[in-house]
Image (cartoon, grey):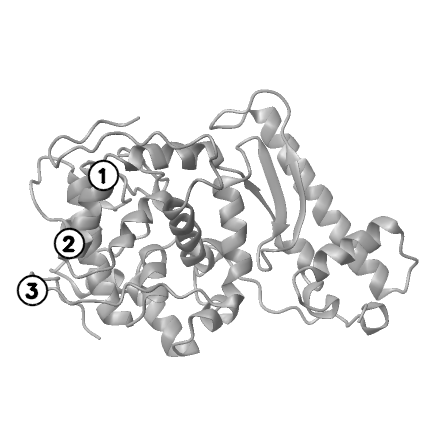
Amino acid sequence: MNRLVINFSTLLIFLAVLNGCSTTQTVTKRDQSPKYRAYIPQQPYQVPQPSAPVTYSGIFPKSAALEPAVDFWRKTYAVWQRAEVAFHDDRYMNVVYEVMTLPGYVGEGLTNEQKQIMNQRREFWKAKVSELESKLRYNATLNADDRQLIVKLESSGKSLNSILPGASNRVRAQRGTKERFKRGLEISGRYNLQFRKIFRDAGLPEELAYLPHVESSFQPAARSSAGAVGMWQFTKAAAQTFMPGNEHADRRLDPFASANGAARYLSYAYKKLADWPTAITSYNHGVGGMKRAQNQMGPDFVRIVEQYDGPAFGFASRNYYAQFLAAREIANNPDPYFREGIQYEAPVAPGQYLAAE
């Protein structure tokens, strides 16, 4: 979770809070490459204060335009295993070039050899897409592999003319997380009822309790390279604002304290941004960042996802809401994905949470 830095003594830190801090990722401008017509088959920040809860609708809209991304993350979470790697277009998520299986035993982390194999295969697909672009530009003869690649690209529903320019730079690798997601479902049994109550008591949609599937797979001691800690992935500064308390204990490691902090944050974000897709995405990109997106693109969330190219609004931010929708759908109905069944762990009460896995 990328967070806002809060310090009430200086205006500089005040602004950093509003702007958010996300992992930097450059979004490529729209490519102006030659066309291929001959080859185309047809407000000021305030510390949240306790107040009467505001009741929200609890509806998380999913437009048809978001379905390709949601489907991609459903497959990532509940179809593709950790030994499988999908090579795909990072903008048009239904363009999947290949799903390969890594050799040997594949654990949570990859060996250097497995990483090398994955990187080499990604470079292979980048070269194949670049070669196709070159052939079309110079009217070269297409072979069977080229035509199969065109079919994959056109599965996006876009014309080849619009999707191929720059596609070689958009090739991305995504490992499956089926085992990890299933384990997260099992662990969620400890917390689900209490988390739902926390959000319900705050006047928020209780299905926000599924966010840890996206953030940490319900691992209480998860840590990110950006310094976020715990099941709900708070940075230290964000925790000081949204879950103040005992300074001698890291309350980010307490799933229940963190859930209350997440409820405070999401209540604040919804009030500032006025819709759930944008508010949920701010959990990754920051309230200030999403407010700038709204100011530039308008309130249409799909337009923001498809067209906004603000600083650090990269792959993770564009996909965050789709990931939440996918996790929510699977958690609500896991049986079609995990036919062996889910052995949910017994609920624990606040103050009795378990240590890290």
Q: Residues within 10 Å of mark 1 (few under 14, many from 20)?
A: many
Is residue 130 visible in the rendered structure shown here? no
Which amino acid lies under the numbered mark 2 shown in the image of this protein?
Answer: Thr
Question: Residue at (81%, 68%) from the top-left corner?
Answer: 41
Measured Cα–Cα span from mark 1 to mark 2: 23 Å
Left or right: 160 in relation to 317: right
Residue 357 % position (x, y): 31, 26
Left or right: 274 in relation to 103: left
Q: Residues within 10 Å of mark 3 (few under 14, many from 20)?
A: few
Name the image quarter holding residue 161.
bottom right
User: Which numbered disc, 1 or 2, marks the residue that appears first in the sequence?
Assistant: 1
Which amino acid lies under the numbered mark 3 shown in the image of this protein?
Answer: Ser
Which dot, 1 or 3, sits closer to the camera?
Answer: 1
Measured Cα–Cα span from mark 2 to mark 3: 16 Å
Measured Cα–Cα span from mark 1 to mark 3: 25 Å
Name the image quarter holding residue 147.
bottom right
In the rendered view, tell whether residue 265 sits above or below residue 273.
above
| Residue at image mark 2 | 241
Which amino acid lies under the numbered mark 1 shown in the image of this protein?
Answer: Tyr
Q: Secondary structure at mark 2?
A: helix
Contact (Cβ within 8 Å) of mark 1 with mark 3:
no
| Residue at image mark 1 | 191
User: Which numbered disc, 2 or 3, marks the residue that appears first in the sequence?
Assistant: 3
Q: Secondary structure at mark 3?
A: loop
In the rendered view, tell whether residue 146 sits above or below residue 35.
above
| Residue at image mark 3 | 51
